[in-house]
Image (tube, coloured by chain):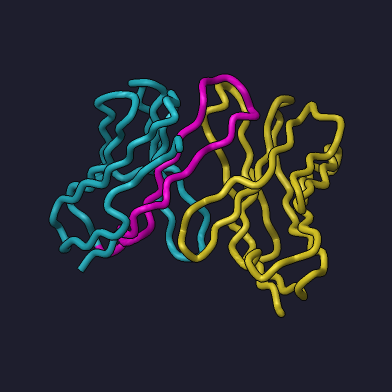
Chain colours: A cyan, B yellow
């Protein structure tokens, strides 16, 4: 089945130690998103790609970076994780633009713990 | 101003009864899409239903229906015949132009279905 895959599902890192979360998709969607979601809150958009075109949200800290080497894969790099970065990280994809009816397809998320 | 407002942080409903989850939105773009997602405790976001701004009829998907009142800018989700498996967080989201890249999420409603 076509899907969005995130690895690992659970990630533990130490304060200040760089960590990379990965996302892959078999849907061949042009747009990929990274969200941060803290407990009982709405997902917060960090950035998105349309093909290789990177779009950063104005309030996304510089500590968060992303790479998209090809259509299928997208990575979230946290350069120096702080305790406040502990959260669920959701990857999502959607079809070509423009069309308001194109929903986002989400991966299962990676739950990041920072010790 | 908030793009999406969900005023019910938590709701209880008896099994087999219907429940309405409220959502209001704010946009000046004539073309937009409204979505509802379900997020169980496992964390994955599951797409439920979509309503386009130009759609004349309210969207329905199985036990889910969307009560779309354009003039009031509301898009309430109605779940009929609630089941225990419906217990989850529910998020209302909107996608608007230009480019339809960005999704705005509400703060969510935690639904608990009682046996």
The percent position of residue A89, horizontal first and vertical second, equals 37, 51
Q: Look at 63% across and 39% down and name the residue there.
A: B94
Q: Residue at x 46, y 48 (%)?
A: A44
Question: How many badges with numbers are in the image?
Answer: 0
- Residue nearest the viewer, comparing B94 with A73: A73
Task: Give the residues in magenta.
Answer: A83-111
Question: Where A29 falls versus A108 (above or below)?
Answer: above
Q: Is residue A59 magenta?
A: no
Q: Height in image: A9 above or below B35? A: below
* The quadrant where residue B110 appears: bottom right
Q: Is residue A8 above or below residue A74?
A: below
Say if residue B1 shows up in the picture. no
In the rendered image, which quarter contains the N terminus of chain B?
Answer: top right
Residue drawn at x 57%, y 42% as measured from the top left: B104
Q: Is residue B111 visible?
A: yes
The C terminus of chain B, quarter of image: bottom right
Question: Residue at left 46%, top 59%?
Answer: B43
Question: Farthest residue toward the front?
Answer: A1
* Magenta residue check for A88: yes
């Amino acid at each position: 089945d076509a899907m969005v895959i995130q690895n690992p599902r659970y990630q533990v890192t130490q304060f200040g130690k760089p960590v990379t979360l990965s996302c892959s998709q078999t849907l061949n969607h042009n747009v990929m998103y990274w969200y941060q979601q803290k407990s009982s809150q709405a997902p917060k958009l960090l950035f998105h790609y349309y093909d290789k075109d990177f779009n950063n949200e104005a309030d996304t800290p510089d500590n968060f970076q992303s790479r998209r080497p090809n259509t299928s894969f997208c990575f979230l790099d946290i350069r120096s994780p702080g305790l406040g970065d502990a959260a669920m990280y959701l990857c999502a994809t959607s079809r070509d633009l423009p069309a308001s009816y194109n929903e986002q397809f989400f991966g299962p998320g990676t739950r990041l713990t920072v010790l | 101003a908030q793009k999406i407002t969900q005023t019910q942080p938590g709701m209880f409903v008896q099994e087999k009864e219907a429940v309405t989850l409220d959502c209001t939105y704010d946009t000046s773009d004539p073309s937009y899409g409204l979505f509802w997602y379900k997020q169980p405790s496992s964390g994955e976001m599951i797409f439920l239903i979509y309503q386009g701004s130009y759609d004349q009829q309210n969207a329905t998907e199985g036990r889910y229906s969307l009560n779309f009142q354009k003039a009031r800018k509301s898009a309430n989700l109605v779940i009929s015949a609630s089941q225990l498996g419906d217990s989850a967080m529910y998020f209302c989201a909107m996608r608007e132009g230009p480019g339809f890249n960005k999704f705005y999420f509400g703060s969510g409603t935690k639904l608990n279905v009682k046996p």
